[in-house]
Amino acid sequence: MKKVRIALLGLGNVGKGVWNILQRNGEEIAQRSGYDIEIAKILVRDVNKDRGVKVPKELLTTDADSIINDESIEIIVEVMGGIEPAMDYILRAVRNKKNVVTANKMLIATHGREIFREVEANGVSINFEASVAGGIPVINGINENLAANKIEGIKGIINGTTNYILTKMTQEGMAFEDALGEAQEKGYAEADPTSDVEGYDPAYKLAILASLAFETEVDIKDVYSEGITKIKPIDISYAKQMGYVIKLLAIANDKNGKIELRVHPAMIPAIHPLANVNDAFNAVFIKGNAVGELMLYGKGAGELPTGSAVVGDIISVLRSEREGTNINLSHYTEKKVKSINEIEAEYFIRMTLIDKPGMLGKIATKLGENNVSILSFIQEPVKGEFATVVFVTHKNLEGNVRKALKEIQEMDMINKVENVIRIEE
């Protein structure tokens, strides 16, 4: 059995997951891959730091060059995250004819094309299954298993932190701040949770998935992202009354050569499979023109699930008889991206106003003047200074809804348009 030497760039949660999996399942992995995988070196910032994992100190190094320039190391596994110095290390490794495995969603989403070109030019490979949805094999599914399909759409829950928070708010009536605090205590959320709760993390992941599925370059700036910080218990309550559940969805569609890319909270029917994806789990719906709809479900984050995806990529590199990346940029075409104003959806609109005769009529008139049709409305009894009113619209252009609400917000008797949530049937 051939021995292959690999190196890890980073020994955080994902790096520890890779180490533990290779120690725990090394014999089985060797049998399946035909290779005895040896971790030869691990790049860290501090060789003396206690990381809660038993790694021989002689494997640790702070010198990236000792890894990148070591001819005996065949695969570089980047699990340090961020743009730099990760990108510099990956490009140098590729130019030294080393295969690369990475879990770095931000890097692939923002600089993937540049990296793929270098990989192709140097006849090596790059695998990045762990960059999206942890242990769920969604990237391999799109690239390999669904290669016979034209992918028409993707819809999913691809951020475990926000899904955990929304689950707690839905099932236990928690406020956002309390649910976030619990997520941080359990390690599901970072000390600075901005990337998750503001929707940036799933936007990176959606950019990667859409680029692969629709074979087009996706600029992260074209992915509309909106987080969950505006979701209140009252919104959760209204959703339940109407038979919906609120989830942070990542949605990509390809219609007539124009794609839409958006991440935002949405109300979905309580009977929809995604409505029952709870806690830190992820799920991705993929629609192909041959296979129809399928759903991939599992743990979307964590030391071992993400480590599993990384080790799976290592095995894929070893098994592959084909040189070069499996990302064929020559097949990519330029596709226009819809602005958020061009999408169509139904809308849940919650606002507070001074309870005066004729106000509902004035609001309805303003919506109608902007071609926004109303499906139903709810007016709550006045509590305190303001009354709460909820409108649910028919399917409308987002641009029309935004224009109408801007004009409504300027009306004297309106306190505030409190929240607008799209409804995805």
Image (cartoon, helix red, strand yellow):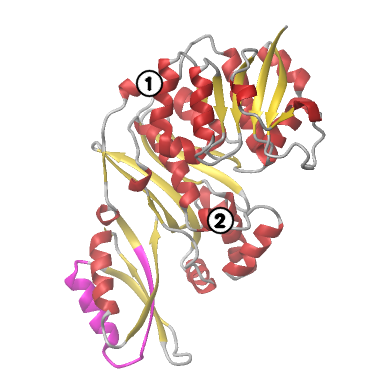
**Relative depth, front residue between 377 and 185:** 185
Find residue 14 and name its label: none
Assign the C terminus to one quadrant of the image: bottom left
So how many labels did they put on this image?
A: 2
**Residue positioned 55% across, 17% down in the render:** 98
Residue 6 appears in the rendering: yes
Asked if residue 355 is among those painted magenta in the image, a careful observer would answer: yes
Crowd band around label 1 with a 10 angstrom C-alpha radius: few (<14), some (14–19), many (20+) = few
Secondary element type, mark 2: helix
Q: Amino acid at mark 1?
A: Asn
Query: Would you name the residue on which mark 2 appears?
Result: 162
Residue 288 appears in the rendering: no
Mark 2–mark 1 Cα distance, whole angstroms, equals 33 Å
Q: Which residues are magenta?
A: 347-371
**Relative depth, front residue between 378 and 325:** 325
Assign the N terminus to one quadrant of the image: top right
Secondary element type, mark 1: loop
User: Extreme top residue here?
Assistant: 1
* Above or below, comparing residue 109 to residue 195 in the picture: above
Asked if residue 21 is among those painted magenta in the image, a careful observer would answer: no
* Above or below, comparing residue 285 to residue 165 in the picture: above
**Residue positioned 27% across, 51% down in the render:** 339
Residue 125 location, x and y as percent? 50, 19
Find residue 328 and name its label: 1
Quick check: 405 left or right of 207? Answer: left
Quick check: 49 left or right of 141? Answer: right
Residue 327 location, x and y as percent? 42, 23
Badge 2 vs badge 1, beta-carbon distance below 8 Å: no
**Relative depth, front residue between 123 and 152:** 123
